[in-house]
Image (tube, rainbow, N blue to C red):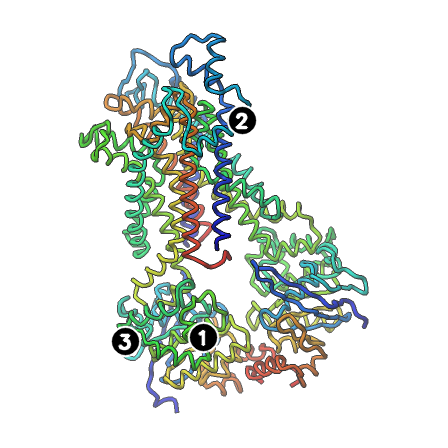
């Protein structure tokens, strides 16, 4: 009974998430104005017919910038989570299954990576390497793969003790077959759930870096930098800050909710 | 026992050296030539001769490993080199900034810990009651709020709409409130969720049912549950200090709180590498030490060998 | 009936932290074709370790393992899997939770894809064909264990190593599973080593019994002898406890 | 012979659910003072849920019927009253030997908590007496240890001591020997019976092991799919069982061959 309710919740949230993705990816269709087109006449106009979210300090349409900004943030986040997920799971599985020296070395590296506070490293790397989304993504990516690696390793470790792995060994199956056919499918569910929960945190990290000016290079639209730019004249044109802030909040909440719901569903 | 302590210190030192090497290497691959930047930022006409003299003075000509060795030993002696921007020694600036950041960070940490602990215990005691549901929603939303977002919203509503606070923090107590609030809210959300999960998992253990079966009072049961969860909670707090450090950089920039975070942000725009490197080394060291302490504490609290 | 499986002077110890615990000390055993050898002992007696060592899943520190006279001491599970199979206590976890029963059993067939034989074995185990399409999570403990028996025979193994295979089952389900084992024994198709802590259960199905305590074999012999006139004190204690709880 | 005995527990028409699955349907059972009643059933028969219902565990939702202990209706008691009742009136011992105490805190400290929860003072002598009967040597050393350092057999004995220390009138045992080896289980059972005689406690023992029930039970109740299908004197039920399920259960138990 509880499972049905959770399933419904997951479906609604995934539809919302999908809607969000579609809106940002096909921003061109939805937003009429060009996000980077400045217009001296329309500086800081309040939300009206042709500028649904008003305009910012340079007269750019906030509505289209929010949509295009969404595309930058969300694609960067998904790419980063996907790469860390793939790298982390692969390394975690190999370490968990083989153990021994490989496990020792790789996990030591992971410990060292985890020894640095993520944001501090991100700021240093982005700061020294210079701006641009690539720098920010590398900065966050360095430490993100570790959480996937650790999760995958601990699951592989417990899966390896299961009887069906012993049965597969007796059936004459090789290590690679066992990892791909038996370990990976049973591993995907928990690690994917973790990926879902990482989306929210990554988005916070990325927009945080852009807010500090270490992420996106102006004029490309990105929620963090939009909030940072709009902050200076918040009294006169609050909409230039509030709409990207709202967009960030809603997106993060949707993905965190989805992550939570999937986790509860798996535990129920 | 001593063997364990020595082993722990050794790993600490090794990781710190690797940390410093990583930071130094980072500077090496950074685009642009620091000497050139220093000259231009001081408005000096850049000619080959002047550039070479500058590089010589900053010691940029020596091979990479030699420069790294020198830099490492100077750090151990507490000398973080001289700032590119104003030729002042970096160490005092960093430490002074660190002091003010500590004020901000520790107050936020204290505020968050106390509130989240009370909320977590309350929500576990009245599980699935209204209080529990409210706390769950609150902690969920606040955990999804990036601290730069909260600070903007707080600034908008409290400073502009209600005019309760000055927009620029003047470093006094009143100025401390908004930054602490912006730092604490996401932390409170995260702590409540993690502590609540820890308590609930402990509550589901057999010994809690055993104690209830003997009519042990709820007070004693909660004491045992909390006592057993303390080990994990220390680890959670230690990990959270990392995010707190990152957060304080953001908050200090927004509210112009003169801590180490603001210092490092200014030095990033000015490409002042020694300050950035000093920041990472100091923060990395503090973070490592905190995690080692948390590790020791959690082993002391739960001596059972790792199952 | 000549000896099909034998172990000589088997030793095994585990290192936990600094402490080294000796789990098997100079244990010998032998199994004749068509015979069922029972190994009884309490927890920590080493009976399961002996089985895992005999199966090739774990390597002994010293001693010899022979299959029809051929030494297979150091061989891997892949090699031992050609002539033996293991039945585990938790039957459900001996099948991959994400694969259907049919696919798991086919996997053990080392490439053999013979649906008739599979259906014949399923019928022999008194199971409905439909169960083959389901995943282990949808089957009861008893059904899973019977599927494990089907898998063992489908793989063509001559020897079955049963590690407390019915301890996790209810009495009635255990009786169902044991009926199948009895029928296989009567048809002379079963050579097995049956490990259990329940001496009454072992006495019902096994021709010979080996009693283990703290890693040693303290008594070994034909079932009527060991049950009727036990020599070792520990065996006596086991029989005494079982007799007190017997329903007669 | 049983009729004139004083009734300590009365379960009438109880239907209850555990984890939103209807597990007990209309069970009625009377338990008499001083007797040992064994409830035998397989997993999923609802026997453990019945024990949880008797000690008013909030994970069990009672749909109809009631449970009365002496004069109190357990199913209607408020949390505070249940807390007072459990421990000094109704005792509970669980299957997991390490399920009685917090594994990482000292045993004597936890005994203190139990005493103080019932307004009594830590009574070391009383504990040592019970340890003596349970064959626990060197009680002072044990009291200073932490449960995770003990073997299964010792932990279960200390759990029994913890239940008996407050002198409960009714003791509920939920599969307490299933996690122990047969020989240790028999010793623990005899020591438990010894304590029962000293304190004239009534015992409800839930087990799947019919043989164990035969050894210690005055009466045996057979439970199947949430119903009590048969309940009679231990010797009668084994000699000529009435219910079909009981017959099959008895025939399925492995016999020691070649006796």
Label 1 neighbourhood size at 10 Å, few (<14), some (14-19), many (20+)?
many
> Toward the viewer: C92 or D111?
D111
The answer to whether one can see residue A225 in this image is: no
Q: Is residue A163 visible?
A: yes
Counting labels gives: 3
**Residue marked by disc 1:** D157
Residue behind mark 2: B66
Which quarter of the picture shows residue A253? top left
Q: Is residue D50 left or right of residue B184?
A: right
Label 1 marks a residue whose chain is D
Q: Secondary structure at mark 3?
A: strand
* Up-down relation of residue D147 to residue A129 (above or below): below
- Describe the element under mark 1 as helix, strand or loop: helix
Q: Are marks 1 and 3 on the same chain?
A: yes
Query: Quarter holding the N terminus of chain D?
Result: bottom left
Q: Around disc 3, counting alpha carbons within 10 Å, would you say few (fewer than 14), some (14 to 19), or many (20 or more)? A: few
**Residue depicted at 60% across the width and 78% down the height:** D254
Marker disc for residue D72: 3
Q: Quadrant of residue B151?
A: top left
For the residues carrying marks 1 and 3, which lies nearer the camera in this image? Answer: 1
Task: Answer above or below: position of D195 versus D53.
Answer: below
């Amino acid at each position: 009974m509880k499972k049905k309710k959770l399933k419904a919740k997951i479906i609604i949230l995934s539809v919302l998430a999908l809607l969000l993705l579609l809106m940002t990816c096909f921003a061109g269709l939805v937003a009429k104005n060009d996000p980077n087109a400045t217009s001296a006449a329309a500086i800081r106009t309040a939300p009206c017919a042709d500028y649904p979210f008003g305009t910012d300090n340079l007269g750019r349409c906030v509505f289209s910038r929010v949509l295009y900004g969404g595309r930058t943030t969300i694609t960067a986040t998904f790419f980063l989570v996907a790469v860390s997920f793939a790298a982390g799971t692969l390394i975690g599985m190999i370490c968990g299954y083989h153990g021994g020296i490989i496990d020792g070395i790789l996990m030591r590296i992971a410990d060292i990576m985890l020894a640095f506070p993520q944001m501090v490293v991100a700021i240093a790397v982005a700061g020294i390497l210079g701006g641009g989304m690539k720098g920010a993504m590398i900065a966050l990516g360095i430490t993100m793969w570790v959480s996937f690696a650790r999760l995958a390793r601990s699951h592989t470790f417990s899966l390896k003790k299961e009887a069906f792995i012993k049965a597969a060994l007796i059936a004459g199956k090789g290590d690679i077959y066992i990892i791909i056919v038996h370990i990976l499918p049973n591993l995907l569910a928990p690690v994917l759930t973790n990926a879902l929960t990482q989306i929210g945190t990554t988005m916070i990290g990325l927009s945080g870096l852009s807010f500090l000016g270490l992420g996106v290079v102006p004029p490309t639209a990105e929620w963090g930098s939009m909030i940072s730019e709009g902050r200076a004249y918040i009294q006169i044109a609050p909409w230039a800050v509030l709409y990207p802030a709202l967009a960030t909040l809603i997106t993060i909440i949707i993905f965190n909710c989805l992550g939570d719901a999937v986790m509860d569903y798996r535990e129920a | 026992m001593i063997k364990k302590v020595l082993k722990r210190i050794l790993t600490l030192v090794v990781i710190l050296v690797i940390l410093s090497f990583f930071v130094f290497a980072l500077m090496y691959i950074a685009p642009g030539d620091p000497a050139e930047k220093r000259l231009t930022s001081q408005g000096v006409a850049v000619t080959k001769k002047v550039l070479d003299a500058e590089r010589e003075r900053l010691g940029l000509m020596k091979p990479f490993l030699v420069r790294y060795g020198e830099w490492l030993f100077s750090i151990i002696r507490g000398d973080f080199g001289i700032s590119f921007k104003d030729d002042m020694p970096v160490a005092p600036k960093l430490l002074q900034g660190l002091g003010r950041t500590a004020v901000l960070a520790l107050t936020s940490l204290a505020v968050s810990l106390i509130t989240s602990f009370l909320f977590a215990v309350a929500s576990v005691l009245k599980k699935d009651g209204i209080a529990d549901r409210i706390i769950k929603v609150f902690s969920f939303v606040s955990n999804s709020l990036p601290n730069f977002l909260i600070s903007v919203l707080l600034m908008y509503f409290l400073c502009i709409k209600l005019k309760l606070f000055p927009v620029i923090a003047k470093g006094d107590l009143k100025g401390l409130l908004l930054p602490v609030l912006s730092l604490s809210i996401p932390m409170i959300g995260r702590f409540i969720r993690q502590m609540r999960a820890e308590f609930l998992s402990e509550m589901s253990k057999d010994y809690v049912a055993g104690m209830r079966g003997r009519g042990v009072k709820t007070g004693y049961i909660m004491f045992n549950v909390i006592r057993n969860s303390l080990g994990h909670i220390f680890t959670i707090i230690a990990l959270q200090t990392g995010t707190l450090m990152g957060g304080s950089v953001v908050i200090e920039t927004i509210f112009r709180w003169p801590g180490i975070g603001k210092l490092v942000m200014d030095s990033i725009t000015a490409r002042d590498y020694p300050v950035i490197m000093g920041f990472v080394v100091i923060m990395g060291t503090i973070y490592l030490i905190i995690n080692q302490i948390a590790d020791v504490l959690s082993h002391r609290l739960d001596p059972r060998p790792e199952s | 009936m000549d000896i099909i499986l034998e172990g000589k002077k088997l030793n095994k110890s585990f290192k936990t932290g600094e402490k080294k615990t000796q789990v098997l000390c100079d244990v010998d055993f032998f199994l004749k074709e068509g015979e069922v050898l029972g190994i009884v002992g309490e927890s920590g007696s080493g009976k399961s370790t002996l089985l895992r060592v005999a199966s090739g899943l774990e390597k002994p520190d010293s001693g010899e393992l022979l299959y029809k006279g051929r030494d297979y001491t150091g061989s891997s599970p892949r090699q031992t899997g050609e002539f033996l199979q293991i039945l585990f206590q938790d039957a459900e976890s001996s099948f991959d939770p994400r694969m259907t029963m049919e696919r798991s059993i086919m996997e053990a067939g080392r490439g053999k894809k013979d649906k008739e034989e599979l259906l014949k074995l399923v019928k022999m185990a008194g199971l409905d064909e439909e169960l083959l399409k389901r995943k282990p999570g949808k089957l009861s403990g008893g059904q899973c264990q019977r599927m494990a028996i089907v898998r063992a025979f489908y793989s063509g193994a001559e020897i079955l190593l049963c590690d407390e295979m019915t301890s996790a089952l209810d009495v009635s389900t255990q009786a169902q599973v044991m009926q199948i084992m009895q029928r296989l024994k009567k048809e002379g198709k079963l050579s097995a080593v049956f490990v259990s802590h329940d001496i009454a259960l072992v006495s019902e199905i096994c021709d010979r019994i080996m009693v283990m305590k703290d890693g040693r074999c303290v008594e070994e012999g034909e079932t009527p002898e060991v049950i009727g006139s036990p020599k070792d004190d520990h065996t006596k204690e086991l029989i005494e406890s079982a007799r007190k709880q017997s329903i007669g | 012979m049983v009729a004139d005995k004083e009734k300590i527990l009365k379960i009438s028409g109880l239907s209850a659910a555990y984890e939103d699955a209807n597990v007990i349907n209309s069970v009625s059972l009377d338990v008499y003072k001083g007797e040992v009643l064994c409830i035998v059933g397989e997993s999923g028969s609802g026997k453990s849920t019945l024990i949880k219902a008797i000690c008013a565990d909030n994970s069990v939702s009672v749909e109809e019927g009631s449970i009365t202990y002496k004069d109190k209706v357990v199913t209607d008691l408020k949390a505070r009253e249940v807390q007072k009742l459990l421990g000094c009136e109704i005792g509970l011992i669980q299957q997991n030997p390490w399920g009685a105490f917090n594994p990482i805190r000292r045993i004597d400290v936890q005994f203190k908590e139990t005493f103080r929860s019932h307004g009594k003072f830590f009574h070391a002598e009383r504990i040592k007496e019970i340890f003596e009967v349970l064959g626990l040597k060197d009680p002072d050393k044990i009291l200073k240890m932490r449960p995770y350092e003990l073997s299964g057999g010792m932990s279960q004995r200390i759990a029994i001591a913890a239940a008996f220390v407050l002198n409960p009138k009714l003791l509920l045992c939920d599969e307490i020997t299933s996690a122990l080896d047969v020989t240790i289980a028999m010793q623990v059972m005899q020591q438990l019976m010894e304590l029962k005689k000293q304190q004239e406690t009534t015992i409800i023992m839930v087990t799947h092991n019919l043989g164990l029930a035969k050894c210690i039970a005055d009466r045996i109740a057979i439970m199947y799919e949430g119903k009590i299908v048969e309940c009679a004197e231990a010797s009668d039920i084994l000699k000529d069982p009435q219910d079909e399920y009981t017959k099959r259960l008895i025939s399925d138990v492995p016999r020691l061959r070649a006796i």
